[in-house]
Amino acid sequence: MFGKRLRLARKRAGLSMRALANATSPKVTAQAISKYEAGKMLPSSAVLVGLGKTLDVSLDFLMSAQVEALDAVEFRKHSGASARDRARAEAVVMDSLERYLAIEHILGIETSIDWAEGRRYNSVANESEIDARADELRRVWDLGRDPIPSLCELLEDKGIKVVEADLPESINGLSCHVLRGGEIVAEAVVMSSRINVERKRFTLAHELAHRIIRSAGNLAINLEGAMNRFAGAFLIPGQRLREEVGADRRRITYYEIVRLKHTYGVSAAALLMRLGQVGVLSRSAVRRAFATFARSWRKSEPDPIRPGHGFAAFEKPRRFKRLVSRAVGEGLISPVRAAALLGQSLKSVERQISGPAIH
């Protein structure tokens, strides 16, 4: 396990074995690094600490065995995402999930992974079936047709680990299974901390789709396109949208689009695409919009949701921090351990424990 973790952390840092050896104190050779990664040798405690500092990973990440590997990894990425970017993202996610499962273990909480076992589909045949799957999941989860206030909270309530992480710029998010002992012990959905709340919500819904729909049964359907379609349908139910703006429109005003994007917490581009998908606008009208007044919307969000306002105030994963705070309160871990798990300063954690100092 240590060898695999070391290799993953090194790949994340973009270092060769020789570069890692040269940067580590106390001194270690590239040959030793090779033996560590191959599982033929273990480092001394001093070298282990030095490797952790050089690679900017915790000793928990290097030595713990909560997460054996990530499986069924599905990336929401740009076309330019490199193998190195993907390796870095997996290392960041594995580190976050290691700490997540560690605090559950400390508290004696078992991870539930059967959140939607009866709602998984091997394939979808067409676009209307994708919408039907999204509508069905809303019914099963008793969500009605109203906008979802927090996808983070919803997914965490369903037993999915939600992680916000500092991913490479080319990757917006991913979904995966967590393996231990060769078995799936958790499922996770990850979003980049860099993106705005509109894209965070769409990314979460897109990665949820990967956990619901395994493949496209029709060769004419692009799988990533199907995931995007599911995300739009899950966030913006078609029947509700048609009732709000009318079933057949020749055009829609900028004011209406902005109002709707703030109502559902999605990007203006995603909202415009959804209007075409449900038949409110013709496909040609949507194409014209993206060629004219909406041509910049895929890169620059019009009238963005401001940080701390509206959906941005709620769209944060909170369960992990709650569990760490609970473990401190129950005396199961020290404030120092809590700070390490949360990646925060000890002073910040002590303030969260005792409140602001009284002068």
Image (cartoon, helix red, strand yellow):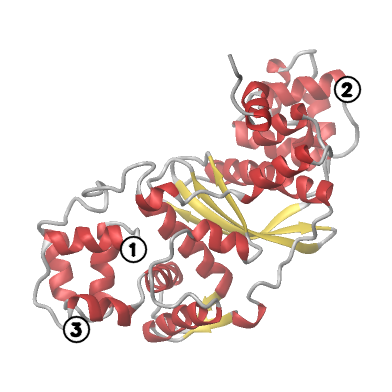
- Residue at x 37% of width, y 85% of height: 128
| Kind of residue at badge 2 | Ser
Callout count: 3
- Residue at x 45% of width, y 84% of height: 218
The 10 Å Cα crowd at callout 1, few under 14, some 14 to 19, many 20 or more, is: some
User: Which image quarter is the C terminus in?
Assistant: top right
Q: In this view, does 147 lie to the left or right of 333?
A: left
Q: Mark 3 points at which residue?
A: 247
Measure the alpha-carbon separation of dots 1 and 2: 52 Å
Are the residues tagged 3 and 1 within 8 Å (C-beta)? no
Q: Name the residue under label 2.
A: 45
Q: Is residue 23 above or below residue 297?
A: above
Secondary structure beneath disc 2?
A: helix
Q: Residue 264 carries which label?
A: 1
**Residue 276 horizontal/vertical position (percent):** 23, 75
Q: In this view, does 71 lie to the left or right of 32?
A: left
Instruction: Tell me which numbered mark, 3 or 2, is placed earlier along the sequence.
Output: 2
* Residue 226 shows up from this direction: yes
- Quadrant of the rendered structure where residue 280 is? bottom left
**Residue 133 horizontal/vertical position (percent):** 48, 82
The 10 Å Cα crowd at callout 3, few under 14, some 14 to 19, many 20 or more, is: some
Measure the alpha-carbon separation of dots 3 and 1: 18 Å
The 10 Å Cα crowd at callout 2, few under 14, some 14 to 19, many 20 or more, is: few
Q: Is residue 295 above or below residue 102?
A: below
Instruction: Tell me which numbered mark, 1 or 2, is placed earlier along the sequence.
Output: 2
- Residue at x 31% of width, y 78% of height: 240
User: Which image quarter is the N terminus in?
Assistant: top right
**Residue 56 horizontal/vertical position (percent):** 66, 27
Measure the alpha-carbon separation of dots 3 and 2: 67 Å
**Residue 199 horizontal/vertical position (percent):** 38, 53
- Quadrant of the rendered structure where residue 238 is? bottom left
Residue sitting nearer the eye, 225 or 150: 150
